């Protein structure tokens, strides 16, 4: 009897531990791409956080800067666009990323509180427009880090990376 309880406890702890060890992200498409993206064109990337509360402003600025850098490289390296520029520079397409929520958990909080500190997270509404301003795609996406302090994916940068991954997936139309 004791052996069964012990085995069940170990299995339960293992599931909780493993579930907290990886970062993740999701997206919800409001409007799918209405026409294919021309991969020989340039995209202008605008990442803003106008709707963020004052208490999240500092975290939002860090997250927006990091997201902009990741998108700048990723959208070209994944073959979605020939090149990328940062808004207000002009491109053939405009990718508007409106960050609406940010929660960055510091390494110190993760060490002190472990899994209880929670995951870092970022969520945004995204629009892809052509150069005339016509909306080609409209979607919501988010990314979160792992919650376990010993995970290699527990940093706030992992949440931002997951959001960039979700954005690229939607633009690939997959």
Image (cartoon, helix red, strand yellow):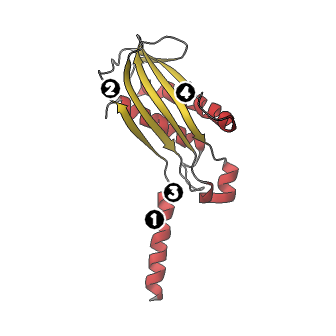
**Residue displayed at 43% across by 25% down:** 127
- 165 versus 14 height, above or below: above
Query: Which-is-in-front pick, marks 2 and 1?
Result: 2
Spatial CA span between label 2 and label 1 = 37 Å
Residue matched to label 3 = 20
Residue matched to label 1 = 15
Residue matched to label 2 = 33
In this picture, residue 164 sits left or right of residue 148: left
| Residue at far left of view | 35
> Of the residues under marks 2 and 1, which one precedes in the sequence?
1
Question: Is disc 2 surrounded by few (<14), some (14 to 19) or many (20+) residues within 10 Å?
Answer: some
Residue 39, quarter of the rendered image? top left
Spatial CA span between label 4 and label 3 = 27 Å
Question: Contact, CB < 8 Å: mark 1 with mark 3?
Answer: no
| Secondary structure at numbered mark 2 | loop
Residue 174, quarter of the rendered image? top left
| Secondary structure at numbered mark 4 | helix
> Of the residues under marks 1 and 3, which one precedes in the sequence?
1
Checking the image for residue 156, the label placed there is none
Residue 8's x, y, as percent? 44, 77
Query: Which-is-in-front pick, marks 3 and 2?
Result: 2
Query: Which-is-in-front pick, marks 2 and 4?
Result: 2
Spatial CA span between label 1 and label 4 = 34 Å
> Of the residues under marks 1 and 4, which one precedes in the sequence?
1
Looking at this view, is 2 or 116 the one in front? Answer: 116
Regarding residue 142, the answer to whether it shows in the image is: yes
> Of the residues under marks 3 and 2, which one precedes in the sequence?
3
Spatial CA span between label 2 and label 4 = 21 Å
- 155 versus 163 height, above or below: below
Spatial CA span between label 3 and label 2 = 33 Å
Residue matched to label 4 = 68
| Residue at far bottom of view | 1
């Amino acid at each position: 009897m004791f052996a069964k309880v012990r085995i069940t406890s170990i299995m339960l702890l293992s599931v909780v531990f493993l579930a907290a060890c990886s970062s993740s992200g999701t997206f919800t498409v409001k409007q799918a791409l209405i026409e294919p993206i021309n991969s020989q064109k340039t995209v202008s990337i605008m990442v803003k956080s106008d709707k963020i509360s004052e208490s999240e402003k500092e975290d939002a600025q860090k997250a927006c800067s990091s997201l902009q850098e990741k998108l700048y490289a990723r959208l070209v390296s994944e073959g979605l666009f020939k090149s990328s520029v940062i808004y207000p520079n002009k491109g053939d397409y405009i990718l508007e990323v409106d960050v609406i929520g940010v929660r960055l958990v510091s390494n110190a909080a993760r060490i002190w509180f472990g899994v209880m500190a929670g995951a870092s997270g970022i969520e945004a509404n995204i629009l892809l427009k052509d150069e005339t301003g016509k909306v080609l795609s409209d979607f919501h996406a988010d990314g979160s880090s792992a919650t376990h302090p010993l995970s290699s994916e527990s940093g706030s940068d992992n949440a931002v990376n997951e959001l960039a991954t979700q954005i690229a997936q939607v633009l690939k139309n997959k």
